[in-house]
Amino acid sequence: MKHYLLYGYGGACNHGSEASAKSEIAFLRKLSPGCRITLSSHFPDYDQRFGVQADEIIGRNPDGKTYEEIYTQTIQCITPETICLSVGGDIYCYSNWERYAAIHYAALERGAKSFLWRCSLDESSLTDEMLKVVKSHHLITPRESVTFRLLKDRGVSQVVQSVDMAFLLPTLPAELPPEPYVAINLSPLILRKNPQVQAAYQYLIDQIVAQTTYDLAFVPHVEIPVDSDVDALSLLKAPENRLFRVPIGLKSEQYKYILSKAELCVTARTHVAIAAWGSGTPTLVMAYSTKARGIAEDLGQDSYALPVEDVTPVSLWQAFSKLYEDRTQSRQVLGERVTQCVARADTPEILAALT
């Protein structure tokens, strides 16, 4: 019986992470019926609440003094037969990446296979020390072309391009706003990166209300208390008769359903863009990282990836206006490109690695 360990995962309170984990688990069960899947999570309670179907969900010890102590349960479940998948996506883009490297090195010491899975990396963060860790994985499967090219340029050979598994997530019905509507997502992360973003979003909303017949749907996608989209969206104002506040507490499949029915989408969270793009919804994304830029490029949507540092009231409205003008063409391109990208989920190299 195959044993897969999924780690580097924050928890389903981030519905993008939830979407990727659910799709990865479904993929592994189809590939290897009867397999055992262990999910290492920072918030197991959220995973149980939102229906993440791993065989076991293990947490961390926040009182641990070392990374090995924090992730003792995770490390202890690794045997030579375990296939370890670092599924955090962009965890090697952040300053705390070494905690996940500790799990990876423990896997190597225990004789297990260790893969850096469906990932993104930022060139500015890829130090020589990090590159050494990355190269020591048995296989790296970037989810977009920018990371794939970066690793190839830095001399990494065991690289196969894949896709973010959230593209494969199905939908579940949920209460919809009055149609037609524009889905709006805003995050504290983006506000920290550029203080002009709040004013730019407010100007955009005012213009949509004044110049179009669209209603607005405010879509939260992360509900971690210290990084809640609800807090960011609460800063924005719109006429109540034109506004639908999508509630927290829905499953990722339900958020995707709401995004799939939108006419257009404007988002700070990349996984909101993935849910919308995967449904054919033309989307404007605030590109703050490699994952946003790379996925937009692969989908032929780079014209609608606005660098977060360039966001101003004028630039955001101009970018939205272009998206509106191009919406029919955008839908056509997404229909073709999403299919091409999803085909990378199970290339022969990936199937061989997992089996």
Image (tube, rainbow, N blue to C red):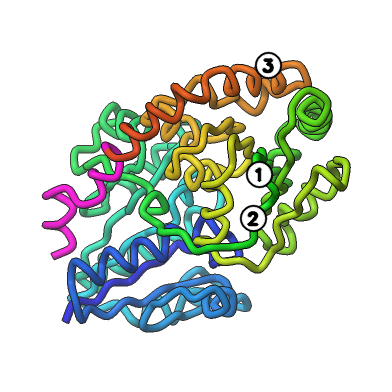
Please say whether residue 195 is visible from this viewpoint: no
Relative depth, front residue between 258 and 315:
258
Residue in the image at 71% along x and 62% along y: 247
Mark 1–mark 2 Cα distance, whole angstroms, equals 8 Å
For residue 304: magenta?
no
Quarter of the image for the N terminus: give it.
Answer: bottom left
Between label 3 and label 1, give the one nearer the viewer: 1
Quadrant in which the C terminus is drawn: bottom left
Kind of residue at badge 2: Leu
Residues at discs 3 and 1 in contact (Cβ within 8 Å): no
Marks 3 and 2 close (CB-CB < 8 Å) = no
Q: Residue at x 28, y 46 (%)?
A: 141
Which of label 3 and label 2 is nearer to you? 2
Image mark for residue 318: 3
Magenta range is 340-355
Residue 278 figure quarter = top left
Q: Which tag, 3 or 2, sits closer to the chain's start?
A: 2
Q: Which residue is mark 1?
A: 179
